[in-house]
């Protein structure tokens, strides 16, 4: 039932070990609880953030990218562009044209300002 689901979510959220591996994403209809390792990248869209997840899932949050940048930095995420935060564990390749290829054919641009910090993580 819905009550059981909500109780389960609350108990999982109250468990510190569980909370370290999940992220609560508010959206227009309520919220989603995501496993951080399933987030491939986050893309800014005005004041909203698009989450690109494994299994080709996508979620749109009503919070901006800066909000998530601070939450995800301790989990192997890196800001690589004004509009992109990526999960470093999902990086497949990088092209000299400034494109980062991620899992499931997701792609993010690498901004000049962020290039040194990105390249240094892999060299």
Image (tube, rainbow, N blue to C red):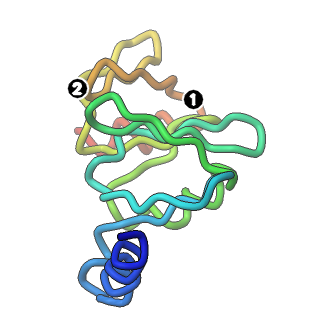
Secondary structure, mark 2, is strand
30 and 66: which is toward the camera: 30
Secondary structure, mark 1, is loop
User: Which quadrant of the figure contains the N terminus?
Assistant: bottom left
How far across and how far down the image is residue 13, in percent? 38, 81
The residue that appears at 24% across and 83% down in the rendered structure is 17
71 and 7: which is toward the camera: 7
The residue that appears at 38% across and 83% down in the rendered structure is 7
Give the residue at mark 2: 92
Mark 1 → mark 2, Cα distance in angstroms:
18 Å
| Residue 9 circle label | none
Q: Residue furthest top?
A: 97
Q: Would residue 116 be seen by someone viewing this image from the given angle?
A: no
Give the residue at mark 1: 111
116 and 6: which is toward the camera: 6
User: Which quadrant of the figure contains the C terminus?
Assistant: top left
The residue that appears at 76% across and 45% down in the rendered structure is 47
How far across and how far down the image is residue 48, in percent? 69, 44
How far across and how far down the image is residue 12, in percent? 31, 81
Residue 15 sits above or below residue 39 on the image: below
Residue 16 sits above or below residue 121 on the image: below
């Amino acid at each position: 039932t819905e009550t059981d689901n909500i109780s389960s979510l609350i108990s999982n959220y109250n468990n510190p070990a569980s909370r370290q591996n999940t992220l609560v994403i508010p959206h227009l209809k309520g919220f989603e609880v995501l496993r951080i390792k399933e987030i491939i990248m986050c893309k800014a869209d005005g004041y909203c953030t698009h989450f690109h997840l494994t299994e080709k899932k996508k979620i749109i949050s009503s919070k901006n990218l800066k909000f998530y940048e601070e939450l995800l930095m301790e989990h192997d995420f890196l800001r690589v562009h004004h509009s992109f935060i990526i999960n470093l564990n999902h990086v497949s390749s990088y092209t000299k044209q400034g494109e980062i290829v991620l899992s499931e054919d997701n792609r993010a641009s690498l901004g000049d300002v962020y290039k040194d910090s990105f390249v240094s993580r892999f060299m």
